[in-house]
Image (cartoon, grey):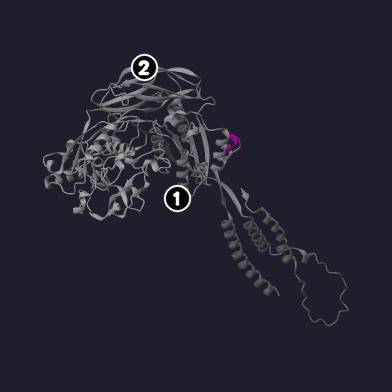
């Protein structure tokens, strides 16, 4: 028991008031008539009788009333064991990121987490979370130990990259709804690479205390990893020296200089082995050429032979599809002989050329099936046979892509094939004796991508445009503009497919684009984008997403999507296969996807190689994050003592007793006053 305001005990001096009041009585003598005083003897009357306390019960009530009032202001309290650990919420976060696979760290962390959960008071509430590629909340705040234990046991090692910034943001958001104190226990290897770029993202709210349980050893074990792989997604000719090769980077983390053996594995068979010297804490490149793969999708792997601290990153998977060169249907008007020549030459000149151009004029395409081609090009052909136009619309709706260019022949018709709107205005810059230039280019667009465009706007600034069509860019992405604001390159999604619109021609009459080197790069990137080769990427990182269908298309209208994960399971339910627009790649290995358009893809998925650097955070950073500079044992003892008890104020009970004393005192005082009147 204690007092919350002990200074008010000075009021106990007021306890003398009832004593003073009871002693402050006058001796009243009633005069009586007497005939003579001569027979009375003079004497001294004693006052002892008048100094004695009378009405002791009334005095005790008044004394108790003053004492209770003083105690009420001192606010007494008792310590009571808290049924829910002082209302504190225990949050257990288990790191299951890729790096926790090293040296048995995950099993050790899980054992510690289970021990912490077992030490929890039975009635206290707790919550279980897993920190991997994202923070997964496995339970709500509950006290059911069976459910909490099952949730913690269900956590398995993952392949994602942990980010302590996600943990900090999630706990701050949680504190806005849960106002009780939070005891956060993180069981992790505390990897330095898991820190966000901004330390403020890791900061926890004021009502949360962080306890770090590190399973990483003070001496970081050396680890080698396949950091990156460069290989073709599609291969038409294995003898092509520019295409048929694989280049891999081997990185060492906290490693000495050593020679490692690196192997190329194709469809579970080792086809080549190279020895590479990796410098201390450095990187080395190894190359395999030629890349001899069979037709179809080939599951390939670069593997480091030997063992180290983290064996899971000693291999990197990727897929390569070998196929004959795909055909591209190029449709032009009968009077245009230049655009197929320029476009075909650029397609063959590209470094990654794997296409064969089939040229035809608009009158010759009535019996052609667009689905037999990688993509279709409409060069200045505003009018198409009605049967082929309908077939082409269905081709685009199911995922086919079309490049449409608007030349001078469209001046006779404002209609834009497949686009859904007409030409708003024709702009003939040659009539004014001037030319237009390209002002802005979006280099993040797949058909225009450039890492370092340079001062000349990636080579597009030198192009002169003589003729262009003004098109309303509503519901379309504009990737390039002329200097007067006219959209030059637009992309619109229709159904599952895309329409890439060039508002000028593909010949050298409306512009001089075909005469510049940037035209070859544009045709190369556009061909791979329109053919869907971007979906057949060599490899992707864990926790990346793959778009399964267009968001603009009604869900399920074009059939289902089939996805098979690395374990051979189907991660999508039947309903998700018809409606899901994307899928998250959660595991390392090969995913096989059959899109609603009928196209297949095999995607190799690898863990983020930041997880390969096993160096933990420094002790200073750990203390800064946890907000503690004292020893762990002292912090734990203080925290435990604080959790077991909570003060319960007795103020209301004391005031209730004081009220009862007031009522009793009033009743008794009235009774005594009546007795005095009778005596008088």
Q: Is residue 640 visible?
A: no
Q: Quadrant of the C terminus?
A: bottom right
Of residue 391 and residue 411, the one placed in the foreground of this image is: 411
| Secondary structure predominantly adopted by residues drawn in magenta | helix
Question: What residue sits right under mark 1 in the picture?
Answer: 177
Work out how far the residue at label 1 is from the one at label 2, CA to CA, in angstroms. 57 Å
Residue 179 counted in the magenta span: no
Mark 2 or mark 1, which is nearer the start of the sequence? Answer: 1
Q: Which residues are magenta?
A: 630-635
Quarter of the image holding residue 45? bottom right
Q: Position of residue 475 (x, y in %)?
A: 29, 52
Residue at 39% over, 32% down = 153
Secondary structure state at the residue bearing disc 2: strand
Secondary structure state at the residue bearing disc 1: loop
Q: Return the mark for residue 110.
A: none
Q: Position of residue 65 (x, y in %)?
A: 64, 61
Comparing labels 1 and 2, the label whose residue is closer to the camera: 2
User: In this image, 232 relative to 133: left or right?
Assistant: left
Question: What residue sits right under mark 2 in the picture?
Answer: 273
């Amino acid at each position: 028991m204690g007092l919350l305001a002990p200074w008010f005990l000075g009021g106990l001096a007021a306890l003398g008031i009832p004593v003073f009041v009871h002693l402050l009585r006058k001796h009243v003598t009633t005069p009586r008539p007497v005939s003579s005083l001569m027979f009375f003897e003079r004497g001294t009357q004693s006052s002892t009788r008048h100094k004695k306390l009378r009405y002791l019960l009334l005095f005790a009530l008044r004394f108790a009333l003053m004492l209770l009032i003083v105690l009420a202001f001192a606010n007494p309290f008792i310590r009571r064991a808290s049924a829910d650990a002082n209302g504190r919420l225990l949050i257990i976060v288990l790191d299951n990121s890729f790096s926790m696979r090293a040296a048995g760290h995950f099993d050790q962390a899980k054992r510690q987490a289970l021990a912490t959960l077992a030490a929890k008071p039975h009635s206290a509430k707790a919550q279980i979370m897993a920190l991997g590629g994202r923070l997964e909340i496995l339970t709500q705040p509950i006290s059911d130990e069976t459910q909490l234990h099952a949730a913690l046991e269900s956590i398995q090692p993952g392949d994602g990259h942990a980010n302590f910034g996600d943990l900090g943001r999630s706990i701050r958001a949680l504190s806005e709804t849960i106002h009780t104190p939070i005891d956060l226990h993180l069981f992790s290897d505390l990897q330095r690479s898991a820190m966000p770029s901004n330390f403020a993202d890791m900061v926890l709210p004021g009502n949360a205390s962080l306890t770090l349980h590190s399973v990483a050893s003070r001496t970081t074990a050396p680890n080698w990893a396949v950091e990156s792989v460069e290989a073709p997604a599609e291969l038409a000719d294995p003898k092509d020296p520019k295409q048929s090769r694989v280049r891999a980077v081997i990185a060492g983390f906290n490693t000495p200089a050593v020679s490692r053996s690196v192997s190329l594995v194709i469809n579970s068979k080792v086809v080549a082995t190279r020895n590479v010297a990796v410098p201390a804490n450095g990187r080395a490149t190894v190359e395999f050429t030629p890349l001899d793969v069979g037709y179809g999708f080939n599951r390939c792997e670069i593997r480091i032979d030997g063992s180290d601290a983290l064996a899971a990153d000693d291999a990197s998977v990727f897929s390569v599809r070998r196929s004959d060169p795909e055909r591209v249907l190029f449709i032009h008007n009968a009077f245009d002989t230049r655009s197929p020549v320029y476009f075909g030459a650029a397609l063959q000149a590209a470094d990654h050329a794997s296409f064969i151009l089939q040229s035809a004029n608009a009158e010759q395409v009535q019996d052609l099936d667009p689905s037999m081609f990688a993509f279709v090009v409409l060069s200045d052909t505003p009018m198409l046979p009605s049967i082929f136009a309908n077939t082409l619309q269905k081709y685009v709706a199911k995922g086919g892509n079309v490049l449409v260019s608007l030349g001078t022949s469209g001046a006779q018709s404002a209609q834009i094939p497949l686009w859904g709107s007409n030409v708003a205005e024709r702009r003939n810059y040659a009539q004014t004796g001037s030319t237009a230039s390209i002002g802005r280019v979006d280099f993040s667009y797949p058909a225009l991508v450039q890492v370092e465009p340079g001062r000349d706007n990636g080579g597009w600034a030198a192009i002169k445009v003589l003729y262009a069509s003004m098109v309303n860019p509503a519901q379309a992405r504009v990737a390039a503009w002329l200097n007067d604001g006219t959209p030059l390159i637009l992309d619109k999604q229709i159904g599952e497919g895309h329409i890439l619109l060039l508002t000028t021609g593909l010949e050298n009459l409306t512009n001089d684009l075909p005469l510049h080197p940037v035209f070859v790069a544009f045709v190369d990137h556009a061909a791979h984008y329109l053919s869907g080769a971007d979906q057949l990427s060599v490899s992707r990182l864990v926790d990346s997403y793959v778009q399964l269908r267009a968001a603009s298309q009604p869900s399920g209208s074009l059939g289902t999507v089939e996805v098979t994960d690395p374990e051979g399971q189907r991660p999508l339910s039947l309903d998700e296969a018809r409606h899901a627009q994307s899928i998250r790649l959660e595991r390392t290995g090969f995913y096989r996807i059959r899109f609603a358009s009928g196209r297949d893809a095999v995607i190799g998925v690898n863990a983020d190689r930041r997880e390969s650097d096993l160096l933990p955070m420094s002790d200073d950073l750990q203390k800064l994050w946890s907000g503690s500079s004292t020893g762990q044992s002292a912090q734990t003892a203080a925290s435990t003592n604080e959790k077991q008890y909570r003060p319960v104020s007795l103020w209301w009970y004391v005031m209730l007793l004081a009220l009862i004393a007031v009522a009793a005192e009033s009743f008794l005082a009235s009774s005594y006053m009546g007795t005095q009147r009778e005596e008088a």
